[in-house]
Image: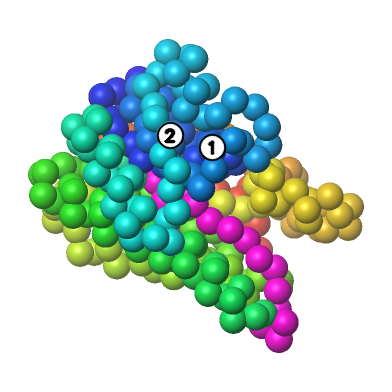
Amino acid sequence: MRLKDKVAIVTGASSGIGRSIALRFAEEGAKVTVADIQEEPREGGKPTHEKIKEEGGEAMFMEADVSSKNSVQDIFYRTAEKYGRIDVVVNNAGIFIQDKIENLEEEEWDRIMDIDLKGVYFCTKEAIEHMTTEGIEGSIINISSIAGLVGYNGATAYCAAKGGVSNLTKEVALDYGSEGINVNAICPGVIKTKMTEEFREDDQVRSFMEQNTPYKRLGKPEDIANAAVFLASDESNFVHGQNLVVDGGWTIH
């Protein structure tokens, strides 16, 4: 029970990586707010908060749009009201659009920036305000990407947004380490989720990804959830301002 008595908010937690993180947090004793634009998992199955409750944990679902400041503020207000405090915030909500810059429309650029980068800004700002006001030495975990560290073919806006997340993580860590607030990012490689399903179904693309991953497999949501548990626990309280790469070795080339 490495997260016993901690309260966590996980955005984008109905599906994929966020769902896996929320489930693992609950297994480790955390109370979890599952925040997502939709309640039903995109890969099917019971809603995340229901599954947590079924297995003896404590969780609630909140419909949330991280690109809306009011929606984000509501997540934090209702979580603190229900559980009394917020110890861990995982900024996981995100979308992926693959387009080279010559084909990328302004609306697509704005949509990715609003969700993948501005959403992290809104949630981090609320987390910092809550933790500093309440004197909580908490953890903020941003889900960035290897695309925030290196180029990724045809993913112009996504790379830009995730690069912003990775550097925002360092800057906020620099400002608030003295408050005892841990701020880190996880940079996943290609993970088997609904978001990556479309291009994973292309045999040529999947083969390319597998061959360029030294570990010779694609990632699983559980791989990221295990890293998130470490960063949310007291075991990592001297790990600060880092972009933890979990990619099977993709970026060592």
Amino acid beneath label 2: Phe
Asked if residue 119 shows in the view, the reply is no
Amino acid beneath label 1: Glu
Instruction: Name the image colouring.
Output: rainbow
Q: Is residue 193 above or below residue 166?
A: above
Q: Find out whether residue 102 is within the magenta segment.
A: yes
Q: Say which quadrant the N terminus sits in.
A: top left
Residue nearest the observer in this picture, 115 or 144: 115
Extent of the magenta region: 90-103
Residue 52 x/y as whole percent: 47, 22
Q: Is residue 82 above or below residue 55?
A: below
Give the mark, 2 or 1, whose residue is nearer the N terminus. Answer: 1
**Residue 28 occupies which quadrant of the picture?**
top left
Q: Is residue 67 left or right of residue 171?
A: right
Circle 2 sits on which residue?
Answer: 61
Residue 170 x/y as whole percent: 33, 64
Q: Is residue 160 left or right of residue 88?
A: right
> Residue 39, labelled with which disc?
1
Residue 141 x/y as whole percent: 38, 49
Residue 25 x/y as whole percent: 41, 30
Q: Residue at x 51, y 48 (%)?
A: 37
